[in-house]
Image (tube, coloured by chain):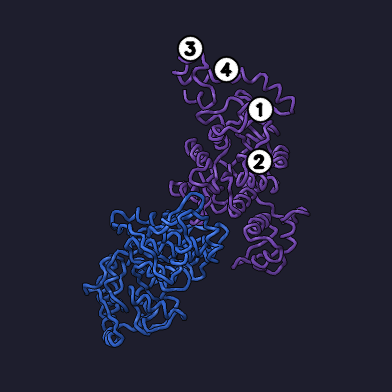
Chain colours: A blue, B purple
Amino acid sequence: MRRFVEAGVSPGDLPDAASRLLLNPHESALLTELLRRRFGEREREEALRHGWCVVDITSAAYPERLKQISDPPLALYVRGDPAWLSRPAIAVVGSRNATLYGRSAAEALASQLALRGLVVTSGFARGIDAAAHRAAVRAGGGTVAVLGCGLTVDYPRGHESLREMVAQHGCLVSEFPLETGPRKENFPRRNRIIAGLSLGVVVVEAHEKSGALITARHAAEQGREVFAVPGNVFSPSARGPHRLIKDGAKLTESAEDILVELAAVFTPQPLASGGAAPAAGTVEASVYAALTPEPVHADELSRKLGLPMASLMPVLCVLELKRCARQHPGKRFSLA
Amino acid sequence: MRRFVEAGVSPGDLPDAASRLLLNPHESALLTELLRRRFGEREREEALRHGWCVVDITSAAYPERLKQISDPPLALYVRGDPAWLSRPAIAVVGSRNATLYGRSAAEALASQLALRGLVVTSGFARGIDAAAHRAAVRAGGGTVAVLGCGLTVDYPRGHESLREMVAQHGCLVSEFPLETGPRKENFPRRNRIIAGLSLGVVVVEAHEKSGALITARHAAEQGREVFAVPGNVFSPSARGPHRLIKDGAKLTESAEDILVELAAVFTPQPLASGGAAPAAGTVEASVYAALTPEPVHADELSRKLGLPMASLMPVLCVLELKRCARQHPGKRFSLA
């Protein structure tokens, strides 16, 4: 009966026959579906009015990977192209109260993963999630944001431009009816979808009680890979990833650590050999412009550009991956 | 024959009979002993003149743990009390070019380990090694420095006061004759002794080619535990520890992670329940004086004391272990 309670439907709302059906897990699922569909009619029309869609579990657009979890959502409300949901994806998740280091690590990873052809899934929260969505799009890839509220709800505040960005270069999805508020109990449920859509979950920063650890637990239970980015042992935000590594998650320094583990299920796109200059007006372009054929120490670049090291390093990482920059011993960088 | 080459004795130096003996590993060891003893007579007298001693493998003062390795030194030159060599010890090692973070982590760990009754072994090098030796002594514990040169050689320069400190609160040891220079090939050999004296080895920071990784490899081969402290994924000094963790070393955030693994072989001293104020004139005393009964954020303490966070945090760690300080949620600290 737990599922109904979690979905906000109390057992008292159900007719007697339905209560009896709940004793059988298979029929209980059918019942859930019926209930959802009844909910769904009005909703479906409302979604269509916005130009969004509802992808239910019988639809060809419903991602196969998500069907494999023990408790798949019966329908997803989708803003953007639902085709993104079925591409090979990896979740990059972490704390809302991220440090500069955490955001930089999330950006470096998400860009690297996007460049190799993986969709970056995350939870659209402030901090690590937002950094991951943005970096994936900026690297030219796609991203999927799984919400803990309905699609029409403006949450978290201040994410208007990120919302547009994700809708253009991926999609926003939610299993909750359109106007559902960001209730606290929605988020742990939402996290099973983040994991369920992905081949693996990377936790970048997480306090000991962070929801990112719930996403990692879902991934482990679903048989997906769990990755964790280490950090400063004095930083409370590194406690979560360190806990996961102690429990068997793969310590992750770069996308390569992830690609190696996924080799059996995902073939990465080869990196462009070109080294085409990055688009003008981006941070990448300014860093690229500061590089010379002679190797220069990263500290000097940091001073020259007025960019803190934690912001500069992920950009250099990406330029290196794009074959625009080259790293030399002693943290020095040159044009490739 | 490899052992002789490593020890700087070329096969050409040996009589024919000796060359033949080398084919038998057991007899080869006897030969090595004979050669060493011949070397040893003059040396022994010279050592005694300094008030130092020579502990050979037949002596009761020779540490049992070191006898268990495949290639134990036949004799050790010891400055300080050789009894320290037989106490339960843990090695804390890492890069010469340590970062502030690395030194702080080494200090926090070495103090915590010393407070729980473990001797801290290290290689007397600049950076992590020096930080570990100093912190162990400052926490009231003992430390053993294993040198890659003879005891009379002033190497590395600038370690005069550390040398005195170690001789007073532990000992300096070397298997090399007193005036042996710090030859490059001595250090990998020296590292087997660091590991051999210890129940486990903690690598704090290490570039990918650091000697600390050789010490860790020796520890693994000797069946000792290997621990590694994670760090910033953009920092080259974290590459070594991260490599070790990927290969199975225990991720280590604090002394507790080490004590748990050593539980079968070492019973830690209980922490003092007292919370006696730290000795005047120490950094610990200034931080202690800045604490109040009301919790204060670490950032504020850092500003107030003019101490960077990376230096402040290990001191707070130690004060907490000594029951002088108490940590509250949100990185805030008060008097205990």
Q: Quarter of the image containing the N terminus of chain A?
A: bottom left
Query: Residue A175: x, y in percent?
Result: 33, 77
Question: Label 2: how many residues lie within 10 Å, few (<14), some (14-19) or many (20+)?
Answer: many
Name the residue carrying label 1: B178
Secondary element at tag 3: helix
Proximity of marks 1 and 2: CB atoms separated by less than 8 Å: no
Task: Give the CA distance from mark 1 to mark 3.
Answer: 29 Å
Secondary element at tag 2: strand
Query: Is the residue at mark 1 from the same chain as the one at mark 2?
Result: yes
Task: Give the CA distance from mark 3 to mark 4.
Answer: 16 Å
Q: Is residue B265 above or below residue B52?
A: below
Chain at numbered mark 4: B
Name the residue carrying label 2: B143
Query: Is the residue at mark 4 from the same chain as the one at mark 1?
Result: yes
The label shown at residue B34 is 4
Amino acid type shown at disc 4: Leu
Question: Label 4: how many residues lie within 10 Å, few (<14), some (14-19) or many (20+)?
Answer: few
Task: Give the CA distance from mark 4 to mark 1.
Answer: 18 Å
Task: Give the CA distance from mark 2 to mark 3.
Answer: 44 Å
Amino acid type shown at disc 2: Thr
Name the residue carrying label 3: B16
Query: Residue B121: x, y in percent?
Result: 61, 40
Which residue does the image show at 52% across and 70% down from the upper left?
A: A97
Chain at numbered mark 2: B
